[in-house]
Image (cartoon, rainbow, N blue to C red):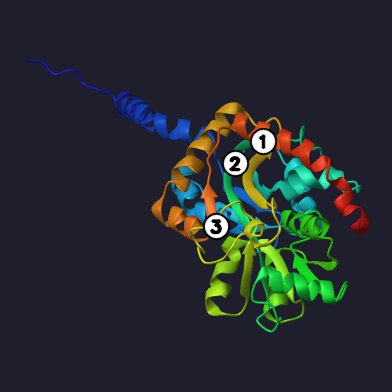
Amino acid sequence: MKLRSVSRRSLMGGVVSVGGMLALPRIARAQAFPTRPVRIIVPFAPGGGADIVSRLMSPYLQNALGQSVIVENRAGAAGRIGTGVVAKSDPDGHTLLVSTESSLVIAPHIGQAIGYDPLKDFAPVSLLTRNTVMLVVHPSVPAKNLQEFMALAKAKPGELFYASSGVGGPNHLAGEIFNRTTGLQITHVPFQGTGLALQAVVSNQVGAMWGFMAGLIPHIKEGTIRAIAVGSRERSPALPDVPTVSESSVSGYEAASWVGMVAPAGTPQPVIGTIWNAVNGAMQEKPVRDNLLGGGSEIVVSKPDEFRKQIEADYVKFGKMADLFKSEK
């Protein structure tokens, strides 16, 4: 049998064709999202609820997306600076925001120009957690429970101070609702993030603080701060011995917060879907769940449309409370 000769060019062409066929899936992946590292902007200093969630998720998001996921803290103005950066970013999914209601629904009602529209400039991805807000004090404060704390504040009106993560944040709101409900005068001292506020209480620069339970539990266990009460309707499984504010003489009081993820408006829905799938998977990982649940957070992975409804409803709700922040513009 006579063998037909094959030219080198034909042979190489065949190799290239086969190689091209084998490379197609890889090329397709390269052209799809993401094509470069993904940046998660947390608009607060390290140590707060949004920062904790972002850093817990990031390695699992990286595995799911096949690109580096970088958590970047852009603190300032109660979250408005970092949030504004994301609002102006390209809507391609490579820049995301993980924040609280502070910058997404409360900020517009404080009375300052914020440079973005929370309802128009973002594409919701998912609600991530609901977080318990609680009151803690430095161990030197002569109050071991809420009744003693209130008695101290009543005896020294305006002389007792509480720290928060910033003006217009959920922790500030918790403190001001407490003041209004009880008729007490406890002076607000804002900081740029939960971490700095906590540091001020641990060092006894400020006697008390309203903050997210997740970041406070380690210090409570170490004894560097004392738990007074939680703002949730029921006691937290993470700190079952700490009473609620409501059961401690302030009936009906409730203070909680949420953390969620959004992308710039105009981000394609397939990209939002890819991010949501990665987030959903990350939030199911045992180390993530154990850390968040142990810190008193409730894990909530909502669909984008559900989170949009939450943002819109809270925008209206907090608009009705705008007068609480008027003195601190």
Dot in front, 1 or 3? 3
User: In the figure, 172 relative to 304: above or below?
Assistant: below
Residue marked by disc 3: 235
Q: Is residue 161 visible?
A: yes
Q: Quadrant of the C terminus?
A: bottom right
Position in image of residue 91 (x %, y %)? 68, 35
Give me the residue at 61% from left, 51% from top: 233
* Mark with earlier residue (2, 3): 2
| Other-residue count near label 2 (Cα within 10 Å), few / some / many at <14 / 14–19 / ≥20 | many
Position in image of residue 44 (x %, y %)? 71, 58
Q: Residue furthest left?
A: 1
Residue marked by disc 1: 310
Give me the residue at 67% from left, 36% from top: 310
Tell me, yes or no, whether the two marked residues, 1 and 3, touch with CB atoms within 8 Å: no
- Cα separation, mark 2 vs mark 3, equals 22 Å
The type of residue carrying mark 3 is Arg
Tell me, yes or no, whether the two marked residues, 2 and 3, touch with CB atoms within 8 Å: no
- Cα separation, mark 1 vs mark 3, equals 24 Å
The type of residue carrying mark 2 is Leu
Q: Residue furthest top?
A: 1
Tell me, yes or no, whether the two marked residues, 2 and 1, touch with CB atoms within 8 Å: yes
Disc 1 is placed on an element classified as helix
